[in-house]
Image (cartoon, grey):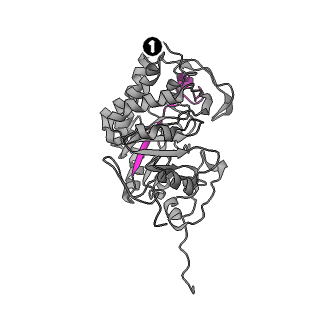
Amino acid sequence: MSDSLLLRPYRSSALDLRNRITMAPMTRGRADDSTGVVNPLTKEYYAQRASAGLIVTEGIYPDLLGKGGPGIPGLVDHAQVAGWREVTDAVHAVGGRIFAQLWHVGRMTHPLILPSGATPLAPSPERITGAQIFTAQGMVDHVTPRAMTTAEADATIEDFAAAARNAIAAGFDGVEIHGANGYLLQQFLAENTNQRTDRYGGSRTGRLRLVVDIVTAVAAEVGAGRVGLRISPDNPENEIAERDPQGTYRELVDTLDPLDLAYLHIVERGEYPALADLRPRWSGTLIANFNGPTPTTRDAGEAVLAAGLADLFSFGRLFIANPDLPARFASAAPTNEHVRDLVYGGGAAGYTDYPPLQPAPRPGI
């Protein structure tokens, strides 16, 4: 596929990538649950997939109260930094580029997951009622979260900045701030989960403030060219309801665009056509993602790039089962399907044991 847009190199002031294929962040749940240090297999897992133009890791907690489930890794202490350093060294050794995704889940956790049985923190005490959450003791009902104090929200900004500093110490090329999919930052953005009356709530500008302040603080800590932001406008995941996604995300993008971040990563999920609406408002690199019920195809990614809606396209589930996904796209080879039951937790099975393409046999052999 010599004419493939996905396979063309991409260069910006912040990024120098071998192709336009991004490995999307995907939870794998294989870190040591007691220490938050990545599994020794994690080095192999990411190195296998380093032919992506850019890897964005699974979500990593910037504070223990932001941990979202069993086996989620952190970036808050020396042991965790040392574990990730082995991963980044392995990816760089084969020419890859890798960003760490910083992920605070807010209300999407449980006392069985958090230290000392702590109550989850959120913008407001709004409980998830239509689903359960996975813990080491199985599926359980959500609890009502505790509303963060203003001081705790302020401290969360510092937590993200400190975790970003740790990410650079661990050898990452940059960090992606997770502001999507119904987790803490989107909980602050959405009207139904943010009922606050302090400076982090009330008006639209107030609801945007935590996200803007976190992005600004992280950019000041490690440099704007090392910072990306992921958003999912109008995404109902985890019982988020945004009454005016167009107004919310236009203001957010307009506020952040002058910072000259490494990229904006948009998950197209709801009825609001976020890519088409926000692309003209974002002057930097834009990564597109489709978070649907089935894996996104190569053709879908090509179409988005051809339409000028994004500069890069991220693939999730396809990268789980196809460590050499760019090579498969280049040769129009079939792709493997991932084994759903092996996505979260466990060992090598469903993690590092998916085979790469085998060389085609030569004629006469």
Query: Residue 156: where, in percent of width, then height?
Result: 42, 25
Towards the viewer: 257 or 208: 257
- Residue 176 belongs to the span the image colors magenta: no
Q: Whole-percent x and y of residue 231?
A: 49, 36
Comparing 140 with 260, the one in front is: 260
Task: Tell whether 328 sits left or right of 86.
Answer: right
Foreground residue among 279 and 64: 279
Residue 109 is one of the magenta-drawn residues: yes
- Magenta-colored span: 97-121
- 271 vs 199: above or below: below
Give the vertical position of 33 relative to 334 (above or below): above
- The reply to whether residue 351 is in sight is no
Badge 1 is on which residue? 198
Quadrant location, the C terminus: bottom right
Amino acid carrying mark 1 in the image:
Asp
Identify the residue at image location x=68%, y=33%: 139
> Which percent across, then down, holds residue 152?
44, 19
Horizontally, residue 247 falls left or right of residue 168, namely right
Q: Residue at x 34, y 36 (%)?
A: 165
**Identity of the residue drawn at 37% across and 58% down:** 93
Query: What kind of secondary structure does the magenta stretch mostly adopt?
Result: loop
Above or below, 192 against 98 in this view is above
| Residue 290 in picture, x, y percent from top left | 56, 45
Residue 280 seen: yes
Element assignment for label 1: loop
